[in-house]
Amino acid sequence: MSQNQFKHLAMGDIAKKAGVCMATVSRTLNNPDRVSEKTRNLVMKVVEDMGYIPNRLAASLRQGRSRNIAIMLPDITNPYFSPIVRTIEQISLARGYSVILKDTQDDPALERSFAEMVKTRQVDGIITNSQRIPFDVDPTQPLHEQLPPIVNASEFCDLEGIPKVGVDNVAIGKDAAEHLLGFGHSRIAVITGTSHILSSQQREKGFRTALLQAKVNFDEKLLYQGDYSCESGVAGVRAIMQLKDRPTAFFCFGDQVAIGALHALRELGYRVPEDVSVIGVDGIALSQYSAPPLTTVAQPLTLIGEHCATLLIDLIEGKQPEKLVHILPHQLLVRASTGPAPKL
Amino acid sequence: MSQNQFKHLAMGDIAKKAGVCMATVSRTLNNPDRVSEKTRNLVMKVVEDMGYIPNRLAASLRQGRSRNIAIMLPDITNPYFSPIVRTIEQISLARGYSVILKDTQDDPALERSFAEMVKTRQVDGIITNSQRIPFDVDPTQPLHEQLPPIVNASEFCDLEGIPKVGVDNVAIGKDAAEHLLGFGHSRIAVITGTSHILSSQQREKGFRTALLQAKVNFDEKLLYQGDYSCESGVAGVRAIMQLKDRPTAFFCFGDQVAIGALHALRELGYRVPEDVSVIGVDGIALSQYSAPPLTTVAQPLTLIGEHCATLLIDLIEGKQPEKLVHILPHQLLVRASTGPAPKL
DNA sequence: GCAAGCTAGGAAAACGATTTCCATTTAAGT
DNA sequence: ACTTAAATGGAAATCGTTTTCCTAGCTTGC
């Protein structure tokens, strides 16, 4: 073992000790087959004895890639992202990459400043959960020549041809609505996500489509603009339950929102699902432990992370992926927070 | 603006265009006062016109520091860590550092392999939530000469003199117990955290101490070994409520555990807090939206993150911090999941 | 008018790997 | 045995910065 594990050893030291040149050490470490077994063993022994570990910064500089990727999220405390991030981290690890986490607070300026990390060579690519692409693109030029490796996760920008991984939010909105309609609900309130965010707009669109198809009128007063937070679920319920014409069901555009809504309904003395049904979206882990367990349209979170990481790293490594856009299947999990509309 | 934002410009290109040498460009960018205003303006103009952004890998190599730090966590999906990570990220950003996230799955081998990142110069320091220090230390030698900048967060190792930020888990255990004892509970069940983990052992110790002091006997059958997960909360309740002599309260060593416990109690038809009280630890955001809202011993999560990041970066930058150990105050949040022990 | 002290800017040496290009040795095929 | 091909090792260029050391040129004070 080395005397001092933090004294800095350079490859030259190893080469000298082993009586070979640096190229040989480098080859031993990175292309072992290109070195004779005898030399390889010799070098490896010296490397281990001295506790040498190569400086990856130097390698990165020379090779022009850092083997880091960045994930940009609007709010890393949202449990929706946890399984996605974890999976991305795991896959990155397996493929030799590290993950740099960036909380953008949904701020375009921060997004752009983080995106510079690929220009500064700190990261080789970016996974972003933002509908804004943090680079200037000239729409008349081919996209892939203008952009570094980038994957749009869950939240899509409107650019054609940009790699995307996520779900069909219109369908999600529709499925949730149809589930409630199927239970006979006709006064359905909606607590949306952040209003300028596409996933929220699309879920709303799907919801409205379903109502239209079922020939159920939608009372605009039953729409509350939330922001995907628990608090907005609480506030939404409180506001809407003050109306004269109360709804018999809430469609919350996120599980956190739904958990807040359940809380507020309980506070106001409503029983779920006997008096009011609640459905969420996302399928976060805790949703199954709410009271009552939450009916929700679950997203395949692990799968999303898996596709994001694989896609991005393939892009970085120049492997042309077969598909650039992955719309993954969602799934309605019927639990106990939804039930038949109450008879009046 | 530059023609192609990803064509690689080196500092030499700027120097040539501006008719100065590279040193001057570098100085303009990093030590503006050491360059005359005239030259500075000239260089800055060229830099902006050409859209030049320096390669940070090269700078890092030369300077011997990456301006990255790593956070190692056993499970990044645990919402306990979210606010801590977010705060660390924010402070790091303000001080010019990026955060690399590593999920160790509580695996010593992974911890050690991640810790190598400081030897490879990928990161300048580490924040670790593990009681294992991922380096070999010789106890006869001074610690700071053997270790890179490292901060032990929430979960402490037993090494003297290692920087630590967290709470007093013995006191937390005691406070929780005393809260329940104060309500007249004398049969208190415990669902612990992961058994080999120090915070869990310390909470247990505090709990036992409080019972001892109150001269209340503890029935060992009421102790369930959990692992800080929701599932262990569910399993713990199911197991313990099968006993002949049932408890009137549960002390769960984490809010996730408590949320699982509430769920299981509901399933079994117990009312909380009328039949059974439940108290958690951590103070995660969602705990206030459980049914009923969870009484818990809250940790100052943001503050923990703040101290971790500040301490680590000070260490990295050679600023000798005044205090290496920060034990931060916890706070009992009395909500609705605890109440007087039922009369028999 | 001259030494001393400053300031601004240039040339070149680092940082520590990878990789290209050769020269040499070894192996294989006829 | 002789040619050709393959395998191996070495020297040096390279990645793109930062930083040290130095030289001019300018003040300033006496």
Image (tube, coloured by chain):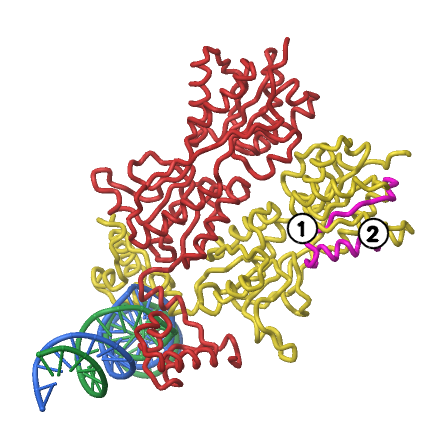
Chain colours: A yellow, B red, C blue, D green
Q: Are marks 1 and 2 on the same chain?
A: yes
Q: Of the residues shown, which amino acid type is indicated by label 1?
A: Asp
**Which chain hosts label 2?**
A
| On screen, residue A129 above or below B9 | above
Relative horizontal placement of residue A40, taking residue B49 as reference (left or right): left
Q: Is residue A115 visible?
A: yes
Question: Which of the 4 quarters of the picture holds residue C11?
Answer: bottom left
- The location of residue B140, given as percent across then percent down, is 20, 38
Relative horizontal placement of residue B220, taking residue A167 as reference (left or right): left
**Start-end of magenta stretch:** A183-209
The CA span between labels 1 and 2 is 18 Å
SS at mark 1 in the image: loop
Q: Is residue A199 magenta?
A: yes
Label 2 crowd (10 A; few <14 / some 14-19 / many >=20): few
Residue A227's mark? 1
Q: How many marks?
A: 2
Q: Residue at x 52, y 39 (%)?
A: B80
**Which chain hosts label 1?**
A
Residue B281's mark? none
- The location of residue B310, given as percent across then percent down, is 39, 49
Q: Residue at x 65, y 29 (%)?
A: B292
Q: Of the residues shown, which amino acid type is indicated by label 2?
A: Glu
Q: Is residue B227 visible?
A: no
Q: Nearer the viewer, residue B145 or B282?
A: B282
Residue contact at pointers 1 and 2, CB within 8 angstroms:
no
Location of mark 2 (residue): A220
Question: Which of the 4 quarters of the picture holds residue B165?
Answer: top left
Mark with earlier residue (1, 2): 2
Q: Nearer the viewer, residue A294 or B325?
A: B325
